[in-house]
Image (cartoon, helix red, strand yellow):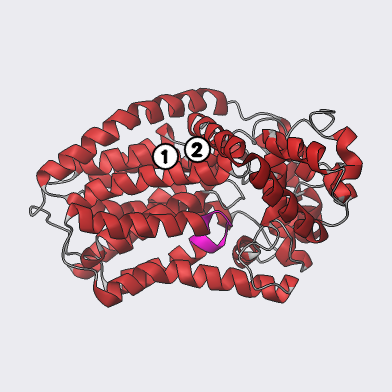
Amino acid sequence: MAEQGRATAAASIAAASFALAWVAFYNGYPLVFADTGTYLGQALQRYLGWDRPVFYSFLLLALHWGITLWAVPVVQAAVIAHLVWLVLRTLGAGGLLRYAVVIAVLCVGTAAPWFAAWMIPDIFTGAVVLVLWLLGAVPERLSMVERLWLVALGTVAIVVHQSHVPLAAGLVIVLLVGRWVFGLGPRLGARGTALLLAPLIAAMLGMMLANLAGHGRFSLSPFGANFLLARVIYDGPGAATLVEACPEKAWRLCAYLADLPPASMRYPSSDHFLWQPDSPFYRLGHPRQTAPEAGEIVAETFRRHGLWQLTRMTENTLAQLRQFRTGVGTDFGPWLSTPGPEPVIAEFLTGDLAAFRSARQATGDLHLLAPMREVHRIVVLLSLPAVLVAAGLSWWRGERAGTLLVAAILAAILGNAILAGGLSAVHDRYTARLAWLLPAATLALLLARPHGQTADQSSRA
């Protein structure tokens, strides 16, 4: 019976994986972004970029082997499909029918399939939340094999994106405090706490070792000051600091004040400043050499205008929470030529080039995106009050772990907004990559059996 149950679970998760990857099949190719070129190129062209970890590049290489990218969306979807299976099972909402309902809602009513199909690491942001909740809230409902698998998966999910490290650190704190506040038992103990911390510690160590090998700096983010520089300039306080301090400072950026706000809007956003090849940022030289000066300017900005900058960061965080449209970055035409992925695909994945160029994304034919984006918006908005009701119901049933799931998701959405909108730039995909967790958690809690009446909680499928 156990073998039959495992086979059924495997078949269900496999079917859900292909269902959640439907956007890639509809598009005719995995969705790409400008960053996809870098993510493919770092491993294939053997370089370490200054602006993002190399580990997603290694993951892509392990999946495409220089042959095709088609395995990537299915594997990314499989990660989510399996995590949803585990969440439902541990909450007492297991079973094929319940699983099918949740997967169907995720496929049609959320952005999850769009992120699963996208060749960027954003799908793993939600995976970080679910992995850490499983390890921190309900480890006793998992087998040791499952826990070890979650540690490995969590390490990968954290290490593929720089922002996942502070996000994961915050979630670990939320989960440990939540277990105490909510009275979850039994105690995690030394082994349980070690397993919860292991993905974060392993990811941090991996990032620091990679930066030591590639950049000579044992640091999590050796060039993070460059992103903060762009943020403070375009928030206003950094620009004011440059105007005030340049007469007495020897900063090289002072030579380009005429091209920066408030004097000029030639480069109208922080993204233009960071990524437009002729911007003052690149005229200073390579970003690796710019980071020390960037750090000085950021520090001086906070010294002179700290309250103003904190106010702007708060405003950006709130703006980020309000923006979660699906697919922004996929529907304004193909990412052809540099810095997009076309040159890398043409050189290293030649068998994919025709499919890449004829995909709906490349031809501007993603007609389903607009109506589905509106459906997703409505689902998220309805899920906001619904998930709170579901959390209360879970508490009333005695399933405090379910209430902690909602707390972890809400904390992750807020923390993500601070890290992305507050410290980097406001973009819809930053909130959208987590918003799908709201309807998923709502359904999981509403479909759950009352605590103590779970028939398959002890199964280890």
Instruction: Write down the residue under mark 1.
Output: 436
Occupied quadrant, residue 276: top right
| Quadrant where the image shows the N terminus | bottom left
Q: Position of residue 327 (x, y in %)?
A: 58, 34
Instruction: Establish if 361 lies above or below 88.
Output: above
Highlighted magenta segment, given as a residue range: 157-164
In the rendered structure, find residue 48 and report the number of the disc placed on it.
Answer: none
Residue at 65 percent across and 72 percent down: it is 210
Residue at 79 percent across and 38 percent down: it is 244
Instruction: Establish if 176 lies above or below 208.
Output: above
Residue 301 relative to residue 1: left or right: right
Q: Viewer-proximal residue, 286 or 401? A: 286
Q: Residue furthest front?
A: 248
The three-letter code of the residue at mark 1 reads Trp
Instruction: Write down the residue under mark 2.
Output: 432
Residue 304 visible in the picture: yes
Q: Position of residue 259 (x, y in %)?
A: 87, 34
Occupied quadrant, residue 83: bottom left
Q: Position of residue 4 (x, y in %)?
A: 23, 65
* Element marked by disc 1: loop
The three-letter code of the residue at mark 2 reads Ala
Residue 195 relative to residue 120: left or right: left
* Element marked by disc 2: helix
**Marks 2,1: beta carbons within 8 A:** yes
Q: Viewer-proximal residue, 255 or 170? A: 255
| Quadrant where the image shows the C terminus | bottom left
Residue at 19 percent across and 64 percent down: it is 459
Q: Residues within 10 Å of mark 2 (few under 14, many from 20)?
A: many
